[in-house]
Image (spheres, grey):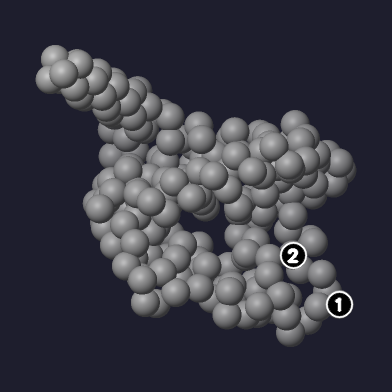
Amino acid sequence: MNLMNRLERALYRLRVAPFFRYVVFAMAGIYMLDMIFPAFGLIGRMALITPLVFRGQVWRLVTFLLIPPLSASILQVALTLYFYYFVGTALEARWGARRFLLFYLIGAAAAMAAGLLTGVGTNEYLNLSLFFAFAIQYPNFELLLFFMLPVKVKWLALLNGVYYVYRFVNGSWPVRAAIVASLVNILLFFGGDLLNLARAQIQQWKRRQQFRRNSR
């Protein structure tokens, strides 16, 4: 955390404005352009593919971050982008633009490194890491699942974790590397807090077990 604070203070030399909404708007625009002009293969030209980067297409190191969710359903893409927008802008409002930028840049660098090492990069798990951060900050915030069922964010984060495990076990090596990379910023920002929380939960469980034994 001290390292993160020092890095954040270094950003005070720069004027940083909230930016993540523009990332989401860019994803939406790219999705629409790719749908209107499929023959151009816009998303394919933006993807992080290591051999092409080494051939000089260095823009892929950045443009892969703007690739929208890949789905045949416009509604699903729209809901996913809205979810990204909601979570990202909420974190920006809580942390401030500089701290959120630091979180995002660390995650982006890790995703880039994973893509370069394995040959193919993805931004999916970087974006999902924003949800983990949101769940840590607002564990009891309620979202309407299917627009009807109120569910606390911490339970959705647990499902997100199950999805991570499933993809790690059944996915390719690029997917596994991207999953591990997406946890780097979470551990750097919240590792100490999560460790203290785990210790507190273990101590609480031990006290309950001791109470039950003494009550017999």
Q: Nearer the viewer, residue 76 or 130?
A: 76
User: What whole-number distance in Å separates the C-alpha atoms at marks 2 and 1?
Assistant: 11 Å
Image-based side of 73 in relation to 81, left or right? right
* Relative vertical location of residue 93 with respect to residue 104 in this rendering, above or below: below
Q: Which residue is mark 1?
A: 39
- At mark 2, the secondary structure is helix
Location of residue 113 in the rendering, given as x and y in whole percent from the top left corner = 66, 34
Crowd rating for badge 1 (residues with CA inside 10 Å; few <14, some 14–19, many 20+): few
Instruction: Specify whether residue 115 is in view.
Output: no
- At mark 1, the secondary structure is helix
Q: Residue at x 79, y 61 (%)?
A: 45
Q: Residue at x 65, y 61 (%)?
A: 67
Q: Quadrant of residue 92?
A: bottom left
Image-based side of 108 in relation to 41, left or right? left
* Relative vertical location of residue 167 with respect to residue 39 in this rendering, above or below: above
Location of residue 197 in the rendering, given as x and y in whole percent from the top left corner = 28, 28
**Residue type, label 2:** Ile
Q: Quadrant of residue 6?
A: top left
Give the residue furthest to the bottom.
36
Give the residue furthest to the front.
216
Q: Which residue is mark 2?
A: 43
Crowd rating for badge 2 (residues with CA inside 10 Å; few <14, some 14–19, many 20+): some
Location of residue 112 in the rendering, given as x and y in whole percent from the top left corner = 65, 40
